[in-house]
Image: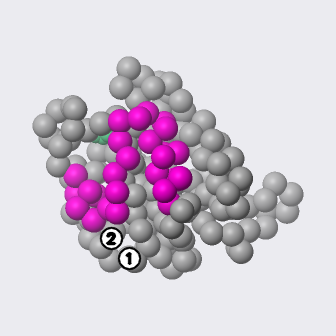
């Protein structure tokens, strides 16, 4: 887990700043080498670094995480609510198309969730056209590569 809500000096949490959770699902830890012709060559750390700079410049803070396990994503959605996060950017990756449990978790919280994808699932195989996340997400940002995250962050920062 990479938590960007700590300062570089004392590890102190920057509690007074709005926090945006950025949650990434399975196989996204392999970005950079995973099917680069589809997902690009940026690593997840590259993306996290750019989002962090962007958020800090806007006086906000990013809590950036990745897991290959569905339950972690669900726990983190609950946690976003518990800590009063301003928004969640969620790239649930393959779980987007399968997980009723993630849909239920999004519906169970009041924190706005934005669906994010590097690729555009609607331009790919038909099994990617169904999005459980999209049934409850506030908006979808897809098909812009790593920029999809930055576009979603811009909107989340304006909430
Ligand atoms: C993805 C699209 C999903 O269909 C796929 O399963 C992923 C990545 C994207 O960011 O483009 O793992 O969420």
Q: Is residue 153 left or right of residue 127?
A: right
Regarding residue 82, the answer to whether it shows in the image is: yes
Q: Nearer the viewer, mark 1 or mark 2?
A: 1
Write the start and end of the magenta stretch as one range: 131-156
Q: Quadrant location of ligand 1?
A: top left
Question: Residue at the location (38% across, 20% down)?
Answer: 37
Question: Which of 82/121 is in front?
Answer: 121
Question: Residue at the location (69% across, 47% down)?
Answer: 53
Judging from the image, the colouring scheme is one colour
Tell me, yes or no, whether the two marked residues, 1 and 2, touch with CB atoms within 8 Å.
yes
Callout 2: 10 Å neighbours few (<14), some, many (20+)?
some
Q: Is residue 75 left or right of residue 120?
A: right
Q: Residue furthest left?
A: 126
Q: Residue furthest right?
A: 9
The x, y position of residue 16, in whole percent, is 71, 74
- For label 2, the SS is helix
Q: Does residue 56 lie above or below 79 as drawn?
A: above
Question: Which of 10/38 is in front?
Answer: 38
Question: Residue at the location (30% across, 36% down)?
Answer: 120
Instruction: Give how far apart the Cα atoms at labels 1 and 2 are.
Output: 7 Å
Callout 1: 10 Å neighbours few (<14), some, many (20+)?
some
The x, y position of residue 148, in whole percent, is 44, 42
Magenta stretch contains residue 20: no
Question: Residue at the location (41% across, 35% down)?
Answer: 144
Magenta stretch contains residue 148: yes
Q: Which mark is residue 105?
A: 2
The x, y position of residue 61, in whole percent, is 65, 60
- For label 1, the SS is loop
Q: Does residue 21 lie above or below 143 as drawn?
A: below
Q: Which mark is residue 109?
A: 1
């Amino acid at each position: 887990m990479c938590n960007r809500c700590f300062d570089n000096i004392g590890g102190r949490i920057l509690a007074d700043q709005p926090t945006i959770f950025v949650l990434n699902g399975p196989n996204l830890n392999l970005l950079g080498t995973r099917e680069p012709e589809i997902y690009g060559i940026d690593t997840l750390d590259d993306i996290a670094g750019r989002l962090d700079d962007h958020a800090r410049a806007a006086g906000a803070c990013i809590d950036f995480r990745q897991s290959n396990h569905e339950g972690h994503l669900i726990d983190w959605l609950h946690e976003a609510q518990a800590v009063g996060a301003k928004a969640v950017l969620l790239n649930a990756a393959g779980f987007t198309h399968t997980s009723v449990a993630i849909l239920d978790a999004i519906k169970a919280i009041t924190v706005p969730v934005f669906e994010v994808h590097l690729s555009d699932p609607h331009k790919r195989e038909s099994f990617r056209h169904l999005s459980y996340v999209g049934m409850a997400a506030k908006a979808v940002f897809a098909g812009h590569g790593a920029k999809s995250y930055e576009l979603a962050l811009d909107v989340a920062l304006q909430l």
